Image (spheres, rainbow, N blue to C red):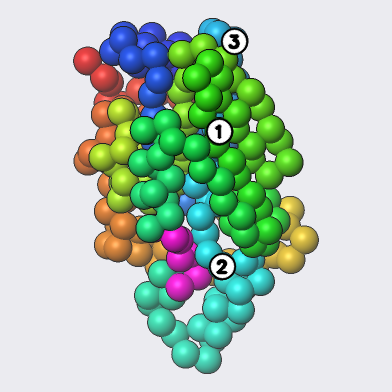
């Protein structure tokens, strides 16, 4: 089983506290995988925290849809940099604080569900416990066995902050269909076009270094029920 393999391999490094990055192209299943792995780790008595890096997006869903709509009048192949901009400076600051166990909080971030800029996070590091609040959800963790699973398409830009990076691989058509299915469930669906999906893919590779090259572990995530290890951690 892939999740058990990851658990056994990662815990062998002897570090009770770890930062693990989960990345891959859009539709590769990063968030679904990270949540599932976090739940699996909790059953192994690991304090597993899922941290969706989409909270650092600086545009709302409405603003993104407006940018996409404007392409009908003037096409710009570099539009994803505007539509999916993130606060890189804040990301580096927060990842540094987490690694150094320095408390911090932030408001007016992007809600991963609604995509509105009204989300708050808090990391409070105490001597014997850590309190983490994501939106309205607050949890207190005790002990040393804490793994933070950060998922996002731009993880490779911050690879120096992570102990391990997991890259989720999936076929283009599989990922595109997942995005189409996901979009249908939104209150205000975007008009997804394949050429725009390709623009996002190219932008992630070109502008943000998204590649499996620097990942220690690569997983075939075409089928959530039948994942396979492509690159193992030895």
> Do the CB atoms of the residues marked 1 and 3 lie less than 8 Å apart?
no
- Is residue 22 among what the camera can see? no
Residue 177 x, y percent position in the rendering: 56, 51
Residue toward you, 85 or 90 = 90
Task: Say which mark, if any, is on residue 43.
Answer: 3
Q: Which residue is mark 2?
A: 59
| Few, some or many residues within 10 Å of mark 1 (<14, 14–19, 20+) | some
Tell me where residue 175 appears, x and y as whole percent: 49, 48
Magenta residues span: 82-88
Q: Is residue 86 one of those drawn in magenta?
A: yes
Horizontally, residue 122 falls left or right of residue 135, namely: left
Q: Secondary structure at mark 3?
A: loop
Q: Quadrant of residue 130?
A: top right
The answer to whether 70 is drawn above or below residue 111 in the figure is: below
Query: Furthest-front residue in view?
Result: 127
Q: Upstream in the sequence, badge 2 or badge 1?
A: 2
Q: CA distance from mark 1 to mark 3?
A: 24 Å
- From the viewer's perspective, is residue 58 above or below residue 155? below
Residue at the extreme bottom of the image, as rendered: 73
Disc 3, disc 2: CB below 8 Å? Answer: no
Q: Nearer the viewer, residue 28 or 148?
A: 148
Q: Position of residue 99 (x, y in %)?
A: 37, 33
Helix, strand or loop at disc 1?
strand
Can you see residue 3?
yes
Above or below 72: residue 164: above
- Secondary structure type for disc 2: loop
In front: mark 1 or mark 3?
1
- Residue in the image at 44% along x and 60% along y: 87
- Which disc, if any, is residue 124? 1
10 Å crowding of disc 3: few (<14), some (14-19), many (20+): few
Query: Does 186 lie within the magenta span?
Result: no
Spatial CA span between label 2 and label 1:
27 Å
């Amino acid at each position: 089983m892939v999740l058990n393999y990851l658990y056994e391999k990662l815990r062998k490094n002897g570090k009770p506290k770890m930062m693990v990055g989960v990345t891959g192209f859009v539709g590769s299943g990063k968030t679904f995988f990270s949540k599932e792995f976090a739940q699996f780790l909790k059953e192994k008595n690991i304090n597993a925290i899922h941290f969706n890096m989409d909270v650092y997006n600086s545009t709302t869903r409405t603003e993104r849809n407006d940018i996409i709509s404007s392409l009908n009048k003037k096409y710009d192949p570099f539009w994803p940099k505007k539509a999916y901009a993130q606060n890189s400076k804040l990301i580096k600051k927060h990842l540094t604080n987490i690694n150094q166990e320095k408390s911090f909080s932030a408001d007016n971030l992007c809600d991963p569900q609604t995509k509105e800029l009204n989300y708050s996070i808090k990391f409070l590091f105490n001597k014997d416990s850590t309190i983490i609040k994501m939106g309205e959800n607050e949890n207190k963790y005790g002990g040393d066995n804490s793994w933070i699973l950060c998922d996002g398409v731009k993880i490779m830009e911050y690879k120096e902050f992570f102990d391990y990076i997991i890259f989720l691989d999936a076929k283009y058509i599989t990922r595109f269909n997942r995005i189409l299915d996901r979009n249908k469930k939104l209150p205000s669906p975007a008009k997804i076009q394949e050429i725009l999906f390709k623009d996002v893919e190219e932008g992630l590779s070109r502008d943000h270094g998204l590649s499996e090259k620097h990942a220690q572990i690569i997983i075939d995530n075409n089928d959530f029920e039948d994942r396979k290890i492509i690159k193992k951690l030895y």
